[in-house]
Amino acid sequence: MKKRNQTLAVMMVAIGGVLVLASCQDVKNDKKSEGTGSKHFMVTASIEPTLKPTVKPTAEPTVEPTVEPTTETTMEATKVPATTATPNTVKKQSQKTKRIVIDPGHQLKQDSAQEPIAPGASETKKRVTSGTEGRFTKVPEYKVTLEVSKQLKKELEKKGYEVILTREKHAVNISNIERAQVANKANADAFIRIHCNGVDNASVHGALTLCPTKNSPYCKAIAKDSYSLSKDILDEMTEATGAANRGVTRTDTMSGINWSKVPVTIVEMGYMTNKKEDENLVSPEYQAKIVKGIVAGVEKYFSNK
């Protein structure tokens, strides 16, 4: 009797070995046909050997492929964690949060003290001015730029960007160099300076952006990215608002650009000396369109990098 029991135990071990090999084979085959969206493999086939009293210890088990999965097999398989991550999700999660510095142009009172227009430059300009004013609405530029900048900050944060404002009130004294230094210190991925335009000719209208020249003697390293940022924002903003697109202007005369070490653009949203645009620029509805366009431009810029 003792010998018979030993023989039966050996037979069960042999059968168990076959079951393990069959299960391993199933997993291997599943891996070849797995989708890109899942890492969860479940072995659902159950192998149930058929034993006959006359079977010798070396007999192969009979596999019945139509047998339903057992509760034990299903419970074991579900211990493997499932994932629904896609390549796009993984890429998005691996990207660092983009940091944007927004500069609401001008301030309540200008500072007429002089500062160099660029590192090492002998030419100087006023540290900062109070900007233009609506010829018809009488609203100062510094108010409009802060209103739009605060809305822009809010909408960009909704998209997951980290946003810094160079000022959050009107009664400040921050020079153009100091504003650029805020962006440099933050190692910003984009420095967006919000402004309104103004000229003597009341018929002039439209939006434009400014960036450094291709061979800027001060910030050539950021010239290419600054142009792309400027163009993407301008194209999307004018599409959202319906304003005339006056193009990207390259210049080396702007202190806030020349002192920048990160991609920079000056966004001239429209002319406060033009009646229609003056009224538009102080309208909450139109400001919302400007913000929508700038956000779309920022998204376009980063998607192409």
Image (spheres, helix red, strand yellow):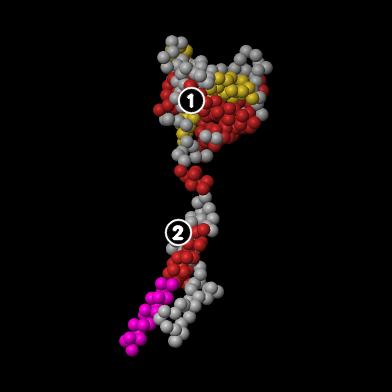
Q: Look at the picture and state if 241 lies above or below 176.
A: below
- The picture quadrant where one finds residue 238 is top right
Q: Look at the picture and state if 85 lies above or below 219.
A: below
What residue is rendered at 49% in x and 37% in y?
Answer: 161
Compared across the picture, whether 280 is left or right of 25 comes to right
| Viewport quadrant of the N terminus | bottom left
The residues colored magenta run: 1-18
Q: Under tag 2, what secondary structure?
A: loop
Q: Is residue 17 magenta?
A: yes
In this view of the protein, can residue 256 be seen by the observer?
no
Badges 1 and 2: C-beta atoms under 8 Å apart? no
For the residue pair 54 and 232, the one nearer the viewer reads as 54
| Residue 60 position in % (x across, y down) | 46, 77
Residue type indicated by callout 2: Pro
Q: Which residue position is annotated with label 1? A: 222
User: Tag 2: Cα neighbours inside 10 Å, few (<14), some, or many (≥20)?
Assistant: few
Compared across the picture, whether 179 is left or right of 273 comes to left
Question: Which is more N-terminal, label 2 or label 1?
Answer: 2
Residue type indicated by callout 1: Ile
In this view of the protein, can residue 28 be seen by the observer?
yes
| Residue 301 position in % (x across, y down) | 55, 33
| Residue 283 position in % (x across, y down) | 61, 28
Q: Look at the picture and state if 58 lies above or below 129.
A: below
Q: Is residue 10 magenta?
A: yes
Q: Under tag 1, what secondary structure?
A: helix
What residue is rendered at 41% in x and 74% in y?
Answer: 16
